[in-house]
Amino acid sequence: MLSTRLVFGFLMAGALVSVLIVDEWVAPWFPFWFLTALIVLNAASLELVGLLGTTTAQPSGNTVFGGVSALVVANWAPHIVEHLSTDPRWADRMALESVGPISVFAWPLFTFAALVMATFVIQSLQFRNSGGGGTIATISVTLLAIAYIGVLGGFIMQMRWLDGSHHGVVPLVLLVSTAKGADIGAYTLGRLVGRRRLWPLVSPRKTVEGAVGGLVFAILAAVLVSMTARHLFGVLSFGLIEAVGFGVCVGTAAQLGDLMESMIKRDCARKDASDSVPGYGGVLDVVDSLLFAGPVAYCYWVWFAR
């Protein structure tokens, strides 16, 4: 199981790096990164809808898929519009204020606000006055799924544009390496020396020893990537102290994300989201740690990267 997880983990990491490198030729459009985000997040949404569908709160699958897809597009929109506004043929019609690391989230925010209203309207068209609260439950769980996958996933997508197209590779590789380092460390140390249960009601197999191992692996990954980027390639990254802090913060958030998805699966009486990814379970089981780690990594990079 561990060997399978490691093999597929390295394959997925290699595929991600390849996508990021190839996309440098078509910055800032990044079509391969766009397709990757669209496919992965919608696959995770499909699995989440399947999980939640086993409960009494039935999400609207079409609304979830449409909402997540709309948020993926919304995360690209400000960068594409800014690029077009520099073209004399479009400049007069597409004037846009400078796109910064905070202001870019105005587009996904407005999109999510529209999705909230659209979800209410869509469910009102299907409303039957049963008095059981089913419509409200559907609205709630549908918006939860959109926010969990689409809103949190937006921070991962936006890391592509941090500090220019070339340097966007570094924060993304740093995020994935640190979060997955935490996953691998927690899994490995938990299997080898895990004794004390960390949070048995949420995830009975997670251990304190595994959590500590996850943090150690996360710190090592963050330091290795940061020092390599900074000293070998001479690109923007963290110093040693900031890299250790990144490993602690992002490693903690990644493990928390894994625990929260475990809570969802446990509440839905499922072991894995699916069996589509050998060694991991489903796509949602792969990205769960990244969904919580993404916002933390994004804010940390904006604040500390030098």
Image (cartoon, rainbow, N blue to C red):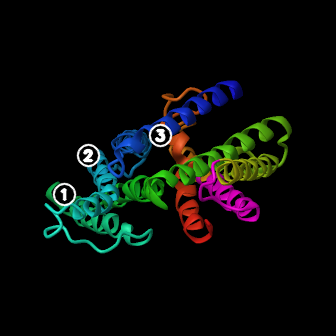
Res. 46 in view: no
Question: Quick check: 18 left or right of 222?
Answer: left
Pointer 1 residue: 122
Pointer 3 residue: 21
Disc 1, SS: helix
Image quarter for residue 240? Answer: bottom right
Looking at the image, which residue sits at the far bottom? 97
Quarter of the image where the C terminus is located: bottom right
Magenta span includes 151: no
Q: Nearer the viewer, mark 3 or mark 2?
A: 3
Indicate the amino acid at tag 2: Asn
Image quarter for residue 79? Answer: bottom left
Q: Give neighbour class at mark 2: few <14, some 14-19, many 20+ (Cα, 10 Å).
A: few
Indicate the amino acid at tag 3: Ile
Question: Quick check: 179 left or right of 44?
Answer: right
Residue 161: x %, y % from top left: 44, 57
Pointer 2 residue: 62
Residue 276 vs 207, above or below: the answer is above
Indicate the amino acid at tag 1: Ile
Q: Nearer the viewer, residue 69 or 18?
A: 18
Res. 91 in view: yes
The residue depicted at 34 percent of the width and 72 percent of the height is 98
The magenta segment = 233-258
The residue depicted at 28 percent of the width and 69 percent of the height is 110
Mark 3 to mark 1 CA distance (whole Å): 41 Å
Q: Give neighbour class at mark 3: few <14, some 14-19, many 20+ (Cα, 10 Å).
A: few
Disc 3, SS: helix
Q: Give neighbour class at mark 1: few <14, some 14-19, many 20+ (Cα, 10 Å).
A: few
Residue 255: x %, y % from top left: 66, 52
Residue 107 vs 254, above or below: the answer is below
